[in-house]
Image (spheres, helix red, strand yellow):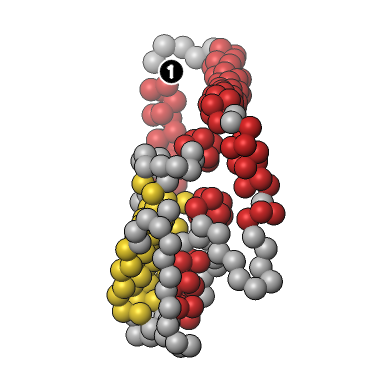
Amino acid sequence: MLKRLTIENYALIDSLQICFDKGFTVITGETGAGKSIILGALSLILGQRADLRHVKQDETRCVIEGLFDISAYRLKPLFDEHEWVYEGDECILRREIWSTGRSRAFINDSPVYLNDLKLLGEQLIDIHSQHQNLSLNDNRFQLNVVDLLADTSKERERYSEAYASYRAAVKALRELSEQYRRNREEEDYLRFQYTSLTEAALEEEEQVRLEEELEALTHSEEIKS
């Protein structure tokens, strides 16, 4: 549930904070009152692509932030799957857009990709209007409904935890394999160096002699002149 929406320097808005209580909320107003502007700002923290026109004229940056109560959404497995920062019952989505065209997205103050914001936003809010598809067509929403009706939430959580462990193990295996490959390359290089030094049959103090000889050859042209 959206608990608070904060808007700064967006379109015609200097600063606005709207707090939502439990239950049904209606925002009304005449045409041009700004209802669509608020909806547009909300869309940005749900992953919609930014436009330079979103930044208020003569300002350098606009910020949209939404505070959500996610206690009833069972989203921890989704957070774990995508390695987002999970902070319990509340979640903050934030979008920052600069007049230069730069844009950043955050989940609980940690930077994320825009697609991450969109993926999470789809689980929190369903914005629809005429001719727009509803979340009923979304596979993840359909699975949530099936799990709810079948009362398999505990089984789903166990599966999600097991799958997260599997992904962590795959990641660890990949890192170990890469480390093994680098170690083999380092071993081959060290063996090559060892063989080269062995074949050179260097005598004691020979490095010092060779360095002195190199120094002499380096300055030989100066001596001749």
Secondary structure under the numbered disc 1 in the rendered image: helix
Neighbours of disc 1 within 10 Å: few (<14), some (14-19), many (20+): few
- Residue at 33%, 67% in the rendered image: 18
Q: Which residue is mark 1?
A: 206
Q: How many numbered marks does the figure carry?
A: 1
- Residue at 50%, 66% in the rendered image: 43
- Indicate the position of residue 146 as horizontal and vertical percent values: 65, 38
- Indicate the position of residue 117 as horizontal and vertical percent values: 50, 54
Left or right: 83 as drawn, with respect to 129 = left
- Residue at 59%, 66% in the rendered image: 128
Q: Above or below — where is 176 with respect to 119?
A: above
- Indicate the position of residue 103 as horizontal and vertical percent values: 46, 65
Q: Above or below — where is 116 with respect to 212?
A: below
Q: Above or below — where is 113 with respect to 166?
A: below
Question: Which quarter of the figure has residue 152?
Answer: top right
- Residue at 60%, 41% in the rendered image: 144
Indicate the amino acid at tag 1: Glu
The reply to whether residue 79 is in sight is: no
- Indicate the position of residue 113 as horizontal and vertical percent values: 51, 53
